[in-house]
Image (spheres, helix red, strand yellow):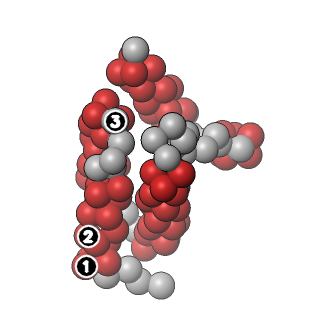
């Protein structure tokens, strides 16, 4: 299934809009991460686009769901052991960096 450029741009904007109600440190962290990931995957092959799109759609829904639940609701979810196992060493390092940045930003 091909995903149009217009649909991808719409999803990108939707993800960034979902950050508007986040606390400032989380919004900056989230916006930065989104921009980096979308830049890295700009030329991704068609075999990756569907999974990439699905993951970002789920992410945006999770952020919006936490916002609707109230200000104190946790945003996101833990990765399953299977998901952690499937990460490449580079992805694991990126995840560790994000955890460190989020802990330092919130304190």
Question: How far separated are the C-alphas under marks 3 and 2?
Answer: 24 Å
Residue highlighted by disc 3: 23
Residue highlighted by disc 2: 9
Look at the numbered disc 1 and give the secondary structure of its residue. helix
Q: Nearer the viewer, residue 80 or 50?
A: 80
| Vertical arrangement, residue 61 with respect to residue 102, above or below | below
As drawn, which residue projects farthest toward the front?
A: 70
x 42%, y 26%: residue: 102
Q: Nearer the viewer, residue 24 or 101?
A: 24
| Vertical arrangement, residue 105 with respect to residue 13, above or below | above
Dot placed on the residue nearer the N-terminal end, 3 or 2: 2
Question: How far separated are the C-alphas under marks 1 and 2?
Answer: 5 Å
For this view, does 25 lie left or right of residue 102?
left
**Image quadrant assignment for residue 80:** top right
Residue highlighted by disc 1: 6
Dot placed on the residue nearer the N-terminal end, 1 or 3: 1
Q: Position of residue 88 (x, y in %)?
A: 56, 40
Look at the numbered disc 3 and give the secondary structure of its residue. loop
> Which of labels 1 and 3 is toward the front?
3
Q: Which mark is residue 78?
A: none
Q: Are marks 1 and 2 in contact (CB under 8 Å)?
A: yes
As drawn, which residue projects farthest toward the right?
A: 81
How many other residues sit within 10 Å of disc 1, few (<14), some (14-19) or many (≥20)?
few
């Amino acid at each position: 299934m091909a995903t149009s450029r217009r649909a991808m741009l719409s999803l990108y904007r939707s993800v960034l809009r979902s950050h508007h109600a986040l606390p400032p440190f989380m919004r900056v962290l989230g916006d930065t991460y989104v921009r980096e990931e979308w830049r890295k995957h700009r030329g991704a092959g068609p075999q990756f686009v569907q999974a990439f799109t699905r993951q970002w759609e789920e992410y945006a829904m999770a952020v919006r769901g936490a916002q609707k639940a109230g200000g104190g609701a946790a945003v996101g979810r833990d990765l399953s052991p299977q998901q952690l196992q499937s990460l490449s060493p580079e992805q694991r390092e990126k995840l560790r960096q994000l955890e460190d940045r989020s802990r330092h930003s919130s304190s």
